[in-house]
Each structure stands twice: as C-alpha cells, then as structure tokens.
Amino acid sequence: MTLNLPSPAQPMKLGTRGSPLALAQAYETRDRLSAAFDLPGEAFEIVVIKTTGDNRAMIDADRPLKEIGGKGLFTREIEEALSSAAIDIAIHSMKDMPVLQPAGLVIDCYLPREDVRDAFVSPSVKSLGDLAEGAKVGTSSLRRKAQVLVANPHLQVVEFRGNVQTRLKKLEDGVAAGTFLAMAGLNRLGQAEVATAAIEPDEMLPAVAQGAIGIERRQADHRAAEMLSAIHDVETGQRLAAERAFLAALDGSCETPIAGLADLAGGTLRLRGEILRPDGSESLSDDRTAPIEDGAELGRAMAATLLNEAGDGFFDWRL
C-alpha cells in the first residue's frame, strides 16, 4: 500500500509547546522527517499549544512546581489535541513525560539522544564545589535540589525557574550564586557557552530520559507510525526502556527526587539509578548491567531493590 505522504496542501501537523527549546525540538523533528521522505519543509506545520503548566508557571513564577502540579500539566492539552486529531504527532522532552500515556496514544519514536549531563551555570565560580558556605543555588528541580544538599549540606537551595535569559538575569541580580540547566537544551538552542561547566553523571546523575526527544502518535495512525519509524533511534529507545521502567516502578513524578541513566556497550546495558530524600538528608543508589533486551526488566528490579532498602516514608516531605 502506498504511503499517503503529507504535502504543502495537506501538511502533517506537529504539536509542541511554544518555548524556544520546544520549538527547536519540533524543527529538528520536522527536518528529520523532511530529509527521510524528501519532502519540503512546507509539508509540515508546527502547531504551538499552550498548556496549563505554561500558564500556571507564568502566574506562579516563584512557587515550586510541585505546588502547581505534576508533569501532566505540561502535556495534557497537547495530548488532548493529538487524541482529537487536531494534530498528527506531538513532540516532547522525555524527561518531562509521565510514564503512562492516555488510552490510544503511544510513544515509540525517539530522536538520537543529546548530551545527558547537567550544566552548572555561575557568574562567579567555576564549579559547584567552589561555592562558599551558605551560598545560594537556584533550581526548581527536586532531583537537583536533593543532590546538591546530599553532597553540599552547607549550601542553600532556592526556587529558580524561567528560560535561559531569565535565569541568567536572576544570577546577575544576585538571587543565587549558581544554577543548573540541561546541556542538551543548551546545545539544541546553540547556547552551549552559557554552561560554566558540564557535570559528569558520576557527580550528578541526570534525570531519567534527560536529553531525549520523544514523538507521540495515535496508536491507530498507521501513516504516522510508518513515517516515525524512519527517524526512530534504536539505541535511544533501548536506553529509555530501562530508565522509564525504573521510573515507572518507583511511581516517579515531579514530586519525587529520582535520577537514572542507561548506557550501552556492545550487547550490554548499564543502568545507574538513584533515589533521594526530598530534604537531601539521604540518597540510595544502584549500578547494574544486563543484556540490552532485558533493560526494562533490569529497571524494574533495580527500583524494587531501592524501594525495599528505602522503606516506608522515604519520599515524604520534611521541608
């Protein structure tokens, strides 16, 4: 059966949030599809969808994300548009995605993963370890907050959100002496020079799926399935299968400090996982390997081990 490819007259609609990073990810997806099927850029239409999370984040700019809602706040309207066929596919930063998709939707396409590392950004020091006792570090990430406090209990962590320029302005104004961004986002925006230093995973394990773009489609949309299969990066999919199985077994959300990273070497997958108390008083970690095809099973087993070691109440808030 001949594939009914999109055209400028009937473009494929790509749904995305409207931030500069989200748009960069949508353009990358469009360009990869365009190259794979030798189609003009006009055969694709970028559809910007404002989510509840975008609105709430602007209104409540100084409140922690956990207080205004979880990950679904930044995906709900996009997934509703996808389910109703107002758009054909949806492009997401996978570290922001819930582990479960709405009925009838599936994510089975990932673009090649970018740099997974966190970036430390500071106008005054070269690394997190150079900050003086009592210095303020800004972040809205519960994972980063807990990781900072576990390794540097002498520092203060303050709420800190916004795009790259907003965060740089806050640093300039002295709201904090340093903050964090994802190297993947900076690279995609062409702003890698903003990073004072990239933090290796051995020092700060990244968020599950950090650096990965996932493309969601309707399960019954066979055209989208075939087109997306042409740009799917198998290795990224294998890595995320393990990481997201680990997260799912932990019931991970924006309200739980969890880190995880899978790497591949030959036919072997290495998974590193970490859970932390929200106040940074304790962290538990694990590091295991398994055949690549057993990655999801490895993720679930690691989560079970860490949950058993943690006991009840490990993620309870004490702040």
Image (tube, helix red, strand yellow):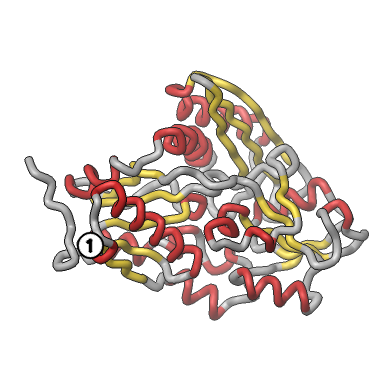
Report the front residue among 146 and 317: 146
Neighbourhood count class around disc 1 (C-alpha, 10 Å): few under 14, some 14–19, many 20 upward? some
The picture places residue 296, in percent across and down from the top left corner, at: 46, 29
Q: Is residue 241 visible?
A: yes
Left or right of 15 on screen, residue 252: right
Q: Secondary structure at mark 1?
A: helix
As shown in the figure, which amino acid type bears the numbered disc 1? Ala
Query: Residue drawn 59% across and 37% down?
Result: 261
Task: Report the front residue among 95 and 276.
Answer: 95
In the image, taking residue 241 as reference, residue 313 lies left or right, namely right
**Residue beneath label 1, please?**
43
Q: List x then y, in percent, for residue 88.
A: 24, 58
196 versus 107 height, above or below: below
Quarter of the view holding residue 204: top right
Tell which residue pokes out farthest to the right in this image: 133
Question: Residue 10: x percent and y percent?
Answer: 15, 65
Q: Residue at x 60, y 76 (%)?
A: 61
**How many numbered markers are drawn?**
1
> Looking at the image, can residue 313 be seen?
no
Q: Where 275 sits versus 6, above or below?
A: above
Viewed as shown, does residue 239 lie left or right of 84?
A: right
Expressed as whole percent of the image width and height from the top left, the position of residue 4 reads 12, 51
User: Which part of the image, by quadrant, shows the C terminus?
Assistant: bottom right
**Is residue 264 depicted above or below 137 in this figure?**
above
In front here: 20 or 300? 20
Which quarter shows the N terminus?
Answer: top left
Q: Residue at x 43, y 65 (%)?
A: 23
Q: Residue at x 42, y 56 (%)?
A: 92
